[in-house]
Image (cartoon, rainbow, N blue to C red):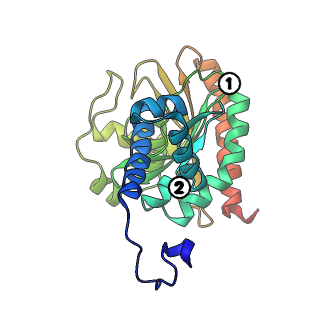
Amino acid sequence: MSKAFGVVGAMPDTPAPITGQGVQSVDRALGILEVLARTGEAGVTEIAVELGVHKSTAFRLVATLEAHRLVEQTVDRGRYRLGVGILRLAGATTARLDLVQEARPICRKLAADTGETVNIAVLSESSALYLDQVAGSSALQPHNWVGQHIPLHATSNGKVLLSGLDEAQLDILLGKLATYTPHTITRRGPLREELDRVRQQGYALAIDELEVGLTAVAAPIRNAHGDVVASMSVSGPSFRLTPDRVESVVALVTEAAVEVSHRLGWGHR
């Protein structure tokens, strides 16, 4: 009882008072989350400098956050990024957390097979929300997209998610289509034609549409009812993902997305 509520004999609905030191620890822990949200990833030394605290203090706070899955270690041990616990606290549903758990081993294999960055995204209001990311061997210091929102019309993941909507939903969702590069689709007519192609071929491409020099391939992840509930993508620099290589990556991405869909009950496999 004393551990749970801070005061021996305290009733469950009577929270223990938070001391000044406790408030400071909470403030510093939140500061760590803000640092990781801004930088993508950081080591304990960098975090300590950012907060203006001793390294041992920073390590203790990071360890506590890691225990609650609010932060997690990257491939490089000793470096941290925001964890999936952040998504849970942000209101992510159990289904989304299950999706990450089921997709993670497949994402790792896909990243290993392609050498590029693999992302899982879901629809979140009028944008795509990245739930998970695995970096391949060729991805040097990739941007950490987990927990970030991206436009739907200018990304392969976004196109896949849009392709799962009906016309009425698209009418509601599609507002002004912002321009990011000269290759961004900014008119509804061409975008609807693009979504028709995505539905027919079973995957989406985005070449230099969000950022010049960035190519991405995405395929739909379906639930037991066949609905598109998420998207899986492989992305990397356009000089590596050439048209010839994209063809082979498409096959790998679609196969991986189908495997995740089966794990979620699609096709009753």
Q: Which residue is mark 2?
A: 85
Image quarter where the N terminus lies is: bottom right
Q: Residue 180: x and y, percent?
A: 31, 27
Q: Give the amino acid at mark 2.
A: Gly
Q: Residue 260: x and y, percent?
A: 67, 52
Image quarter where the C terminus lies is: bottom right
Q: Please name the residue shown 60% across and 54% down the image.
A: 67
Q: Which residue is mark 1?
A: 137
User: What is the CA distance from the residue labelled 2 to the residue labelled 1?
Assistant: 26 Å
Q: Look at the picture and state if 141 lies above or below 267.
A: above
Quarter occupied by residue 196? top left
Q: Earlier in the sequence, mark 2 or mark 1?
A: 2
Q: Please name the residue shown 65% across and 55% down the image.
A: 101
- Label 2 residue SS: helix
Q: Look at the picture and state if 90 lies above or below 189.
A: below
Q: Please name the residue shown 48% across and 28% down the image.
A: 46
Quarter occupied by residue 125? bottom left
Of 80 and 24, nearer the camera is: 24
Q: Badge 2: how crowded within 10 Å, few (<14), some, or many (20+)? A: some
Q: Residue 245: x and y, percent?
A: 65, 21
Is disc 2 in contact with disc 1, using a CB cutoff of under 8 Å?
Answer: no
Res 148 seen here: no
- Label 1 residue SS: loop
Q: Look at the picture and state if 215 lies above or below 20.
A: above
Of 115 and 97, nearer the camera is: 97
Q: Please name the residue shown 58% across and 17% down the image.
A: 242
Of 245 and 115, nearer the camera is: 115
Foreground tag (2 vs 1) = 2
Q: Badge 1: how crowded within 10 Å, few (<14), some, or many (20+)? A: few
Q: Give the amino acid at mark 1.
A: Ser
Res 127 seen here: yes
